[in-house]
């Protein structure tokens, strides 16, 4: 998957590549925007954690959201997620732990997904909304 680094989500600014022969045309299609290439991952479930980190490293999160997709594009988000509370807490704790390694304060999303054969979450961190002066 080739997508723009900014605003490339839910089918916008994205091109699914199935052959290396498609790369040049896809890259040209970005029209000079910064791009990133991601591996294609099939997942059984996706959730989002939106958390906030203070200047002092304190962390808090909103209730976990559950995401549903149609043709690999986000269709509906449910909040709060109808999810086993232990799985929700596990996702929040992953977000909290990853926030300790970052040097920002403000709000940020984490996208968590579970592969059909895996019993644990994998996590992608979104771009933080930085509070000025931090």
Image (cartoon, rainbow, N blue to C red):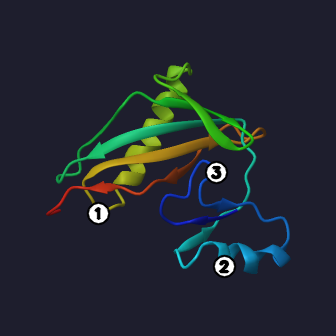
Q: Residue at x 59, y 70 (%)?
A: 36
Q: Residue at x 36, y 52 (%)?
A: 99
Report the mark closest to the observer, 1 or 3. 3
Report the mark closest to the observer, 2 or 1. 2
Question: Circles 2 and 1: CB distance less than 8 Å?
Answer: no
Residue 120, x across and y down, in percent: 63, 40
Mark number for residue 28? 2
Residue 55 visible? The answer is: yes
Q: Hey, which quadrant is residue 87 in on the image? A: top right
The residue nearer to you, when weighing 53 against 75, is: 75
Farthest residue to the left: give it: 133
Question: Circles 3 and 2: CB distance less than 8 Å?
Answer: no
Question: Circles 1 and 3: CB distance less than 8 Å?
Answer: no
Residue 118, x across and y down, in percent: 72, 41
Per the image, label 1 sits on a secondary structure element best described as loop
Which callout, 2 or 1, points at the residue further toward the start of the chain?
2
The reply, left or right, for residue 45 in relation to residue 35 is right
Q: Hey, which quadrant is residue 27 in on the image? A: bottom right
- Label 3 and label 2: CA atoms lie apart by 17 Å
Image quadrant in which the C terminus is located = bottom left
State the residue position of label 1. Answer: 103
State the residue position of label 3. Answer: 11
Please, is residue 3 above or below residue 90 in the view? below
Q: Hey, which quadrant is residue 24 in on the image? A: bottom right
């Amino acid at each position: 998957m080739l997508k723009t680094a900014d605003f490339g989500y839910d089918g916008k600014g994205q091109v699914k590549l199935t052959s290396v022969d498609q790369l040049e045309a896809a890259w040209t299609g970005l029209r000079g925007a910064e791009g990133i290439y991601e591996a294609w991952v099939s997942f059984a479930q996706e959730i989002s954690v939106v958390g906030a980190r203070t200047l002092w490293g304190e962390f808090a999160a909103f209730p976990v959201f559950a995401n549903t997709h149609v043709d690999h594009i986000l269709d509906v988000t449910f909040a709060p997620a109808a999810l086993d509370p232990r799985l929700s807490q596990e996702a929040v704790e992953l977000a909290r732990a990853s926030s300790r390694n970052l040097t920002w304060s403000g709000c940020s999303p984490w996208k968590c997904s579970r592969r059909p054969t895996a019993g644990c979450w994998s996590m992608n961190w979104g771009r933080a909304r930085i509070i000025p002066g931090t």
